Amino acid sequence: MHYRYLDSPLGRLLLVGSDAGLNLVHMDEQTHLPPQTSWTRAERQLDEACQQLDEYFGGRRRRFDLPLAPQGTAFQRAVWQALLEIPFGETRSYRQQAERIGRPSAVRAVGTANGANPLAVIVPCHRVIGSDGSLTGYAGGLVRKALLLELEGASLPAQARLAF
């Protein structure tokens, strides 16, 4: 596993990858950081991921084209795959995501899987909001979630907007 840091509008991001692909994009102060065993500092291995993140934050990229290798259960991976299908600048509710994976009664479990998403920004869990349009749950914090949605030009109800 290789790692490197990237400065971004969200703060410093920790990127971790292996030969299989990108395993982790972690924000400072974010929950769910896995153990840091046997990681070595990346030389060039994560350059493409950093370049694509820079393009995204600069408004020049709407979709990532990277090999991804998140670690999780089959259910979590299904939830994360469904997140990748939410178009740039659009939002979905947790209920819609549960229905999307064929588990309409698993709304809370979908929320938990979103919260465990190891690939912040790349796998866009920030695009999932409450059924009433409210910004709810984001491991990187609601301010970062709002910033990402604003960057993408997502239409949000007035109650979902945060004052900065």
Image (cartoon, rainbow, N blue to C red):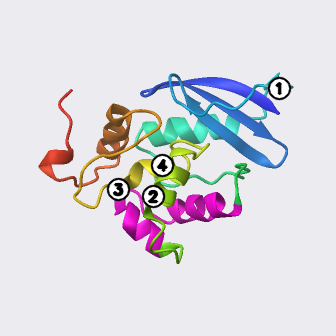
Q: Nearer the viewer, residue 45 or 127?
A: 127
Is disc 4 in contact with disc 1, using a CB cutoff of under 8 Å? no
CA distance for labels 4 and 1:
32 Å
Query: Which residue is identified by label 2?
Result: 108
The image position of residue 61, as x and y in percent, is 48, 49
Q: Where does the image place residue 19, in percent across and percent down from the top left?
A: 85, 44
Percent x, y of residue 120 = 54, 41
Location of residue 42 with respect to 150 vertically, above or below: above
Amino acid type at image mark 2 = Arg
Nearest to viewer (mark 4 / mark 3):
3
Camera-side residue of 82 and 62: 82
Mark pair 2, 3: CA separation:
24 Å
**Camera-side mark, 2 or 3:** 2
Which residue type carries mark 3? Gly
Q: In the rendered structure, which disc, 4 or 3, sits on the residue that comes first in sequence?
A: 4
Mark 3 lies on residue: 89
Question: 97 or 108, which lies in front?
Answer: 108
Magenta-colored segment: predominant secondary structure: helix
Label 3 residue SS: loop
Q: Quadrant of the C terminus?
A: top left
Q: Earlier in the sequence, mark 2 or mark 3?
A: 3
Q: CA distance from mark 4 to mark 3?
A: 12 Å
Question: What is the number of the mark on residue 37?
Answer: 1
Disc 4 secondary structure class = loop
Nearest to N terminus: mark 2 or mark 1: 1
Between marks 3 and 1, how big is the CA–CA gap? 36 Å
Q: Secondary structure at mark 1?
A: loop
Residue, disc 4: 61
